[in-house]
Image (spheres, helix red, strand yellow):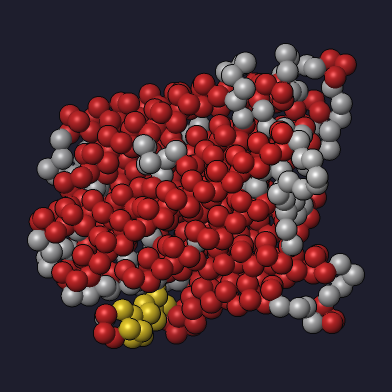
Amino acid sequence: MNDTALQYALVALVVLPLLGAIGALLPAPPGLKGRDPDQAVLRHGVSVTGAVLLLSIMLAAGFDYGHSARMQGTTDLSWIPALHIRIHLGVDGVSLPLIVLTALLTFLCALHAYFKMPEGPTPKAFVALLLVLEAGTLGTFAVLDLMLFFLAFEMVLIPMYFLIARWGGEGSPVSGHHPSEEALRARSRVDRAAFRFILYTLLGSVVMLLGLLLIGLKAGTFDMVALATDNGSKLSHSTQIIAVLAIGLGLAVKAPMWPLHSWLPDAHTAAPTTGSVLLAGVLLKMGTYGLVRIVLPIAPQGAHFFAPYLAAFAVVGILYGSLACLALGRKGSGGDLKRLIAYSSVGHMGFVLLGIATLTPTGVNGALFANIAHGLITGLLFFLVGAVKERYGSTDLDQLAGDGGAALYGTAPRLGGLLAFGAVASLGLPGLAGFWGEMLAMFGSFHPAAGLSRPAYLTFMALAAFGTLLTAAYLLGVVRRVCMGDRGAETVRLADVRGFEFATWSPLVALTVLAGLWPAALLGLTDPAVRTLLGGH
């Protein structure tokens, strides 16, 4: 595929979900209404996200892997000349895997919703919000202008807010003349979680905008490729430090980095299954992608100054997330399985941040690999937790396990087997995707970039390695409590994996195994681009 075809594919990739969102809100043509208008609009969502996935596969197939450090399929048009803002799109080895991951997870979420629509308002609004969310996420990974990056970054907030607030928890808002106190409390928790999500991310984005404006005004351009090529030569040392502090704080909220993570567990617990999958699998990657794409190449002196602090916060996040999961998984603690998986994301994203903080090709490649692995594995886990909740009516671990364990192997063996697979993949079992990113992040800490304190990074590496032991402890504990056990007379045969669930989950399982057995496919794609970003060439 030539560069012009790649250009059209990339533009269509970003624009098509927006057009699909508008189409979802319009009345369906008479021939396409079908017997059920709700199913028709859900079918529309599957069709549009499927077309976007096909475009992403075409983009990947036509990509020149021999020059993955070069921006390909670029579109560069003047938009606001007075402010030097341009519509600049492109894809390289860093952004291509994230674009394909976003398209895949959004399609799987639309497919899942077609068969199991979350309770809430009209499906029209759900599909439209899902497509706007996809457009914003794809735009974040495809744009090459700082102001466009900010707009795309902000574009995802409102759709995710409404997905949590309107379709989260038990579904639609409480109704009836006398709703129960429990229903009111549940609705209050969902509203509070949605509010905290948008409050944290909006505040972080305001600070990030100030940093982006500072870079653009001082350097005379908002073009990310030109800024990366200059490698901070037009920005003074103090300007870089201020800019990295502002931009880093905004991106750290989205990552999320400890201690700016507290919105995440509530948002995940309240969100519907599709919302949790996209939040963990895609939205968290926007923060770490911004660090690699903007902070490292554009303000290298500022990145070097803050790298040890980022590494320290990353390691604290690894340990904190693991200890929180251990506490939630303990018998009698009233822990929630969905909340536990959410806290595990804090720990896993800590490894991504640690890899970035090493400022080495090894560490940054590990961070990008861990990004993709986390999206696949945690997306699968949230799909599985949603299935467990549907069958048992709860994700409370004490209710699930009872005295002798939930006995998922006996009641729904395929579902239990997949949950165990997701758990061992998440704990970093060699041969699966979760292993390589975390290992490379720690290996990068063993030899950090020149000028960084090696003793400090060796300490960070040791603490991160201890975190992997804690991760194995809580995930194996969850498998024991949920999958094993004998509930005796209470044991009833539950619905095992259904056809649409198999179709939704099997791509994630296959890619988790493929990435674990053939990591060079992804590392070979990202490495040239990472070396270029770190070198400013």
Q: Which residue shows up at 20% across the image and 31% down it?
A: 456
Query: Which residue in the rendered view is the most extreme toward the front?
Result: 177
Name the image quarter holding residue 355: top left
Q: Nearer the viewer, residue 496 or 315?
A: 315
Q: Which residue shows up at 33% across the image and 37% down it?
A: 314
Up-down: is 281 above or below 266? Answer: below
Residue 9 appears in view: no
Q: Nearer the viewer, residue 467 or 183?
A: 183
Q: Which residue shows up at 45% across the image and 80% down it?
A: 7
Q: Nearer the viewer, residue 14 or 448?
A: 14
Name the image quarter holding residue 230: bottom left
Name the image quarter holding residue 78: bottom left
Q: Nearer the viewer, residue 159 or 321?
A: 159
Residue 20 point in image, percent of width and height = 64, 74
Up-down: is 350 above or below 230? Answer: above
Residue 12 point in image, percent of width and height = 53, 78
